[in-house]
Image (cartoon, coloured by chain):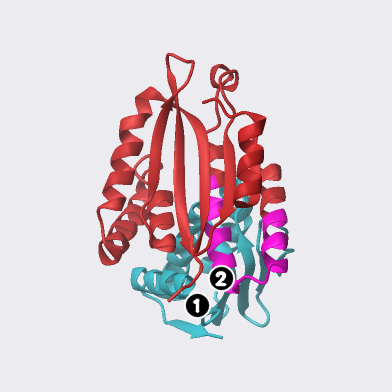
Chain colours: A cyan, B red
Amino acid sequence: MEHLIIDKTDDTPSIDFNPTSRELKISGRSLPEDVTTFYAPVLEWLDELEETPVGEFKFIVNLEYFNTASSKLILDILMRLEDIHTGGNNTIEIIWNYDKRDTDMEEAAEEYSELVEVPFQIVGI
Amino acid sequence: MDTSLKQIHSIMNDENAVLIYSGEFNQDIVKSMLSYTEGKLESSGIDDLVRKKIFNVMVEQLQNITKHQYTAEEKQVVQPCFILIEQENFYNLVTGNPIHIDTIQMVKDRIDQVNGLNAEELKALYKQARLNSRISEVGGAGLGFIDVARKTENKLEYAFFDIESANYKYFTLKTQINKIIE
C-alpha cells in the first residue's frame, strides 16, 4: 500500500493516509466544485485497504468545514470504513476532532456516528 | 427587476454592506468572494463562530447559484447576484438568480417545508435526505436548504419576481445569521 498524500488547497482538504503509522487523516476545508473527482483516489485507496490485511487503523478527521456535496462523499468514506472494519482484514477507529465551540460540526459528527457501525470518538478541542 | 446604480449605491451607503456582487458565478469567483469576505470579517473583529456560520451558509448559497447555472436565454435577461449586509443584530445573506417557471413550485414546496419544521424535525429530515442522496442524485436535492435552515436557525425568506421572460422568474432567497450565538 502506498502512502497517499494530497496537499490542501483553498477548497479541498489535505489527505494523509499513511499505511506505516496506520493513521488516515483528513484536515481542512472541503468545498470543491467536483467532489467526485477529488475523492476518487481516497475511495480507491480504501478499496485497496479492504483487500489488504495490515492491522488497526485510526481515521482522524480535523475538518473545519465541508459543504453539502462533500457531506455525501464523507458518508461514502465512512461507509467504506465500516466495510473494512467488518470485513475482517483490518480494524478501524474513527476520531473526529472539532473546535469545541462549533456545535454545528459537533452535531454533524454525532449524526455520522449514528449512521456507521465503527468505534467513533468525537473530541472537542 | 430594475436595480439601478443609484439603488446599489444607496444600499452600500445606508446599510453596512460587506459584499455586493452581480454577474457570472463559477467556482473561482466563489472562492474569491469567500476569501474577500473572510478577510473583511476577520478584520472587523467578528466572533469566530459567527464568521464560520456566515462562511458555511454563503458557500451553500453561492454554490447553489453556480450549480443551477443559467442558460443562454436567461443570461440575456438578468444576472444572478449576492449581497451580504451587516445589520445591528444579524447579518443578511441574499441571493438572486433566474429560475425556470417549471421548477418554482418545487423550490417553494421545499422551502415552505423547511420553514414549517423545528430544530428536531429539521434534523430528522436532514438525516433522511442525506440517506436518500446516496441512492439517487435527484432524491437528494434539498439538502442545501435544510442545512442552511439548521445553521442559521432562522426562517428562509424568498420571493419570485417577474422579469422580461416567458419562461423565467427571478428568485431571491434571504437568510439571516444572528450575531449572538447562544
Disc number for residue B33: none
Q: Chain of mark 1?
A: A
Report if residue B41 lies within the magenta region. yes
Image height check: is B149 above or below B109?
below
B86, B172: nearer the viewer: B86
**Residue at image coords 51%, 68%:** B179
Q: Residues within 10 Å of mark 1 (few under 14, many from 20)?
A: some
In the image, what residue type sits under mark 2? Answer: Thr
Q: Amino acid at mark 1?
A: Asn
- Give me the C-alpha separation between circle 1 and circle 2: 8 Å
Please state if A40 lies on the left or on the right of A68 as rendered: right
Residue A111 seen from this side: yes
Residue B76, compared with residue B124, is above or below; it is above
Circle 2 crowding by C-alpha within 10 Å: few under 14, some 14–19, many from 20: few
- For residue A90, the mark is 1
The residue at which mark 2 appears reads as: A52
Q: Are marks 1 and 2 in contact (CB under 8 Å)?
A: yes
What span is in magenta?
B35-61
Which of the 4 image quadrants contains residue B148?
A: bottom left
Q: Quadrant of residue B25?
A: top right
Question: Majority secondary structure of the magenta segment?
Answer: helix
Q: Is residue A2 visible?
A: no
Q: Secondary structure at mark 2?
A: loop
Above-or-below relation of B141 to B99: below
Of the numbered discs 1 and 2, the one sitting upstream in the chain is 2
Observer-side mark, 1 or 2, equals: 1
